[in-house]
Image (cartoon, rainbow, N blue to C red):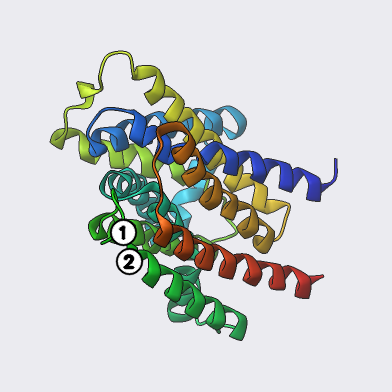
Amino acid sequence: MSDQFKGLLITTVAVLLVVPDSLFVRLIGADALVIAFWRNLVSGCLVLAGVLLWQGLRPYKALPGTGIYGLIYTVAVGGAGVLFPLAVSLTSVANVVFIIAALPVFAALYSRIFLGEAISSRMIWTMMAVAVGLAILAYGSGETQGAHWTGDLTALGVAALFAAGLTAARKVRRVSMVAAVPVGYIGASALLWPFIAPMSVPDGQWHLVALHGAFIAGSSIGLALGPRYIPSAEVGLLILLESVLAPLLAWLVIGEDPGPYALIGGVVVIGALAVSNAVALARRG
């Protein structure tokens, strides 16, 4: 099996595993922060078990050497894991995933500000198109049932926070940050614990809680391993699948209509990012 095929396979499976994330939040009849608690705790414990099983304590001995950048990544992962279910509870699934798809724009801005990397003309055009798409989404939040600007802002926070984590991780790329994922997840759950009622999940839905955590754990591991074998532009194109499939899944399973503004804005955002990544791949080839 070639590295190219291996990377595509791992990343595609990882993206497919994260597609039902927002649907699980809709299906589990508990408060959003309770869902975030169990989502982070279950997936964090599973990823931790996987790291210890395959690599032992070695990755954790390397983490302190990442300093402030490792800390930023860890906090970003845990924080995004809390904000995502909160965003889904406050606005439509389509709005959440389309807004989070704008993450590369934040990453480019952070790389410019904190790493001193120039923003290419391709990325400037991409940012402008994404801004138009997000403006359409924002306008539609006042017109579409189930959508609200508070959830949209929370989703924007997820994108901004996780982009900060990815930018920090690039600063210490010599160290695998997979081991930091369970630290962030479990740490976030520990902070939430005193403020929620963890056992308030309705009877008969604990299997959904377990599946939710398992899917996120599998996706987290896959998205950490896949990019080792294929270029970031290819990873970006595959990740866009989640932004397309998640609203369709919610529409199919629970009848959540994304509304015309979300669809138009989403097409603009996803289209801009897809074209941008395709251009990057073409230039690389």
Q: Position of residue 81 (x, y in %)?
A: 36, 45
Residue drawn at point x = 73 percent, y = 52 percent? 229
Residue 55 tag number:
none
Does residue 182 appear in the picture of this structure? Answer: no
Vertically, is 110 above or below 175?
A: below
Measured in 3D between alpha carbons, the distance from the residue under mark 2 to the one under mark 1, in whole angstroms, is 7 Å
Q: Nearer the viewer, residue 166 or 275?
A: 275
The quadrant holding residue 173 is: bottom right
Which residue type does callout 2 highlight?
Answer: Ala
Residue drawn at point x = 66 percent, y = 44 percent? 12
Quarter that holds the C terminus: bottom right
Which residue type does callout 1 highlight?
Answer: Asp
Q: Position of residue 135 (x, y in %)?
A: 37, 72
Is label 1 in a helix, a strand or a loop? helix
Vertically, is 196 above or below 76?
A: above
Residue drawn at point x = 52 percent, y = 68 percent? 268
Could you tell whether 233 is left or right of 160 in the image?
Answer: right
Q: Position of residue 26 (x, y in %)?
A: 34, 35
Q: Nearer the viewer, residue 138 or 78?
A: 138
Could you tell whether 55 is left or right of 181 in the image?
Answer: right
Residue drawn at point x = 42 percent, y = 51 percent? 94
The residue that label 2 is drawn on is: 138
The residue that label 1 is drawn on is: 152
Is label 2 in a helix, a strand or a loop? helix
> Upstream in the sequence, badge 2 or badge 1?
2
Q: Which of the two marks, 2 or 1, is nearer to us in this view?
A: 2
Could you tell whether 245 is left or right of 162 in the image?
Answer: right
Q: Position of residue 203 (x, y in %)?
A: 27, 14
Quarter that holds the N terminus: top right
The quadrant holding residue 22 is: top left
